[in-house]
């Protein structure tokens, strides 16, 4: 069998430097192969194979002028992005990580629009990372997302080693303290939320210290009103845990349940599907705007505030760590740097100076 006809065309790597050719709506045979340097028919692959280089691609394009190089690369882009997502799913990456990695690798591909994704090299990675650092001034966490997504692509899709310096994850950590809301500010934001469902969502996040992904993943069965617990299924790191169920939150949830009658998810959309993260973010920012609180905060700030307020009221750091689902106590310890607990007992030496002040 030396003639192939398929439903679409793209380039699929079968080794470090060879493509498998899949062609749309026409046949590829020995005559075509003879006009592409190094092209041959692979029995095991049941496909024609050609070297992965610009010369071979140009020779292929001359044989089939109806196919533009841009269209060819678009097909290759779509195929590799699908393979990339499939690999992430097989490796059991979280839904949130898959979304982030796909966005990052898509931006990487788009930065080199005239280059086939399978032809990207270490030099391309170097150019892209330096562009982001110099021109976009990206943060350390963003840089890690970029490198991890590209590293996964090179290792799992292209099957290449990633020993280049630009694939290394920066080890230094940015010492940024989270922005925290006071109890009165949290109260103000929630009170500015008039819709009962919206109020219940924000109240649940703060009262239990939940992540955004955790609150939208809650099911009715995860609320244990008798034991006053909320069960988090498959949280960060795919770990289950339990957190506290506030008596006041339970009252709010019961009122919400009577009015909205959710079926499966604790918080459902109009069609009974899972509530979206974007909707929760929109709710928070609308209430924040109404409250006129002038702080650069997000939905996640409610979780930070919850942890800080627990610490300030004297709760043990080890229990706070378990409630938040932190793997390391060092992550939880950041809240000791922003709590005002104990600060009120410390008197500044400036207060003992006899300073003349003219009014």
Image: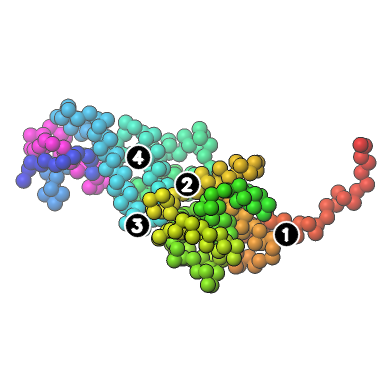
Q: Dot 3, crowdedness within 10 Å: few (<14), some or many (≥20)?
A: few
Residue 33 inside the magenta-drawn segment = yes
Q: Is residue 59 visible?
A: no
Residue with the mark numbered 1: 341
Q: Closer to the camera: disc 3 or disc 2?
A: 2
Residue most extreme to the front:
259
Residue at mark 3 to residue at mark 1: CA–CA distance = 43 Å
Q: Mark 4 points at which residue?
A: 121
Residue 172 horizontal side relative to residue 5, left or right: right
Residue at position x 63%, y 65% in the image: 317
Q: What stretch is highlighted in magenta?
A: 13-39
Whether residue 31 is visible to the viewer of this picture, yes or no, is yes
**Quarter of the figure with the C terminus:** top right
**Residues under labels 4 and 2: Cα distance?**
39 Å
Image-based side of 258 in relation to 116, left or right: right
| Residue position for label 3 | 91
Question: Quadrant of the rendered structure where residue 207 is?
Answer: bottom right
Secondary element under disc 4, as helix, strand or loop, is loop
Q: Are marks 2 and 1 in contact (CB under 8 Å)?
A: no
Q: Is residue 139 left or right of residue 356?
A: left
| Numbered mark located on residue 122 in the image | none
Q: Where is residue 152 in the image (x, y as percent from the top left)?
A: 37, 49
Above or below, 41 against 66 in this view is: below
Q: Is mark 1 on a helix, strand or loop?
A: loop
Give how far apart the Cα atoms at labels 3 and 2 are: 29 Å
Element class at badge 3: loop
Q: How far apart are marks 2 and 1 (CA)?
A: 34 Å
Nearer to us in this view, 118 or 69: 69
Q: 203 or 329, which lies in front?
A: 203
């Amino acid at each position: 069998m030396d003639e192939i006809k398929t439903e679409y065309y793209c380039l699929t790597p079968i080794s470090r430097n060879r493509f498998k050719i899949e062609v749309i709506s026409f046949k590829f045979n020995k005559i075509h192969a003879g006009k592409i340097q190094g092209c041959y028919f692979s029995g095991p692959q049941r496909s024609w194979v050609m070297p992965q280089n610009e010369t071979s691609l140009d020779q292929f394009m001359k044989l089939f002028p109806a196919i533009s190089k841009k269209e060819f690369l678009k097909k290759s882009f779509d195929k590799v992005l699908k393979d990339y997502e499939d690999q992430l799913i097989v490796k059991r990456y979280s839904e949130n990580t898959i979304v982030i990695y796909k966005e990052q690798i898509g931006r990487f591909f788009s930065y080199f629009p005239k280059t086939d994704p399978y032809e990207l090299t270490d030099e391309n990675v170097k150019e892209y990372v330096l562009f982001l650092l110099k021109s976009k001034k990206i943060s350390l966490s963003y840089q890690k997302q970029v490198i991890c997504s590209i590293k996964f692509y090179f290792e799992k899709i292209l099957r290449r080693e990633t020993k280049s310096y630009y694939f290394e994850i920066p080890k230094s950590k940015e010492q940024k303290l989270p922005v925290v809301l006071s109890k009165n500010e949290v109260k103000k934001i929630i009170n500015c939320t008039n819709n009962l469902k919206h109020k219940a969502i924000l109240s649940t996040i703060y009262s239990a210290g939940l992540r955004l992904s955790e609150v939208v993943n809650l099911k009715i069965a995860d609320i244990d009103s008798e034991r006053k617990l909320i069960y988090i299924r498959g949280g960060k790191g795919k770990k289950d845990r339990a957190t506290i169920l506030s008596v006041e939150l339970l009252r709010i949830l019961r009122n919400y349940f009577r009015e909205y009658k959710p079926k499966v998810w604790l918080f459902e959309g109009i069609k009974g599907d899972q509530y979206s993260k974007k909707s929760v973010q929109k709710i928070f920012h609308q209430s924040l705007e109404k409250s006129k609180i002038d702080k650069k905060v997000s939905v996640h700030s409610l979780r930070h505030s919850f942890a800080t307020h627990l610490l300030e009221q004297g709760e043990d750091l080890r229990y706070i760590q378990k409630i938040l689902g932190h793997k390391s106590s060092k992550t939880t310890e950041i809240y000791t740097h922003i709590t005002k607990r104990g600060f009120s007992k410390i008197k500044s030496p400036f207060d003992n100076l006899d300073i003349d002040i003219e009014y």
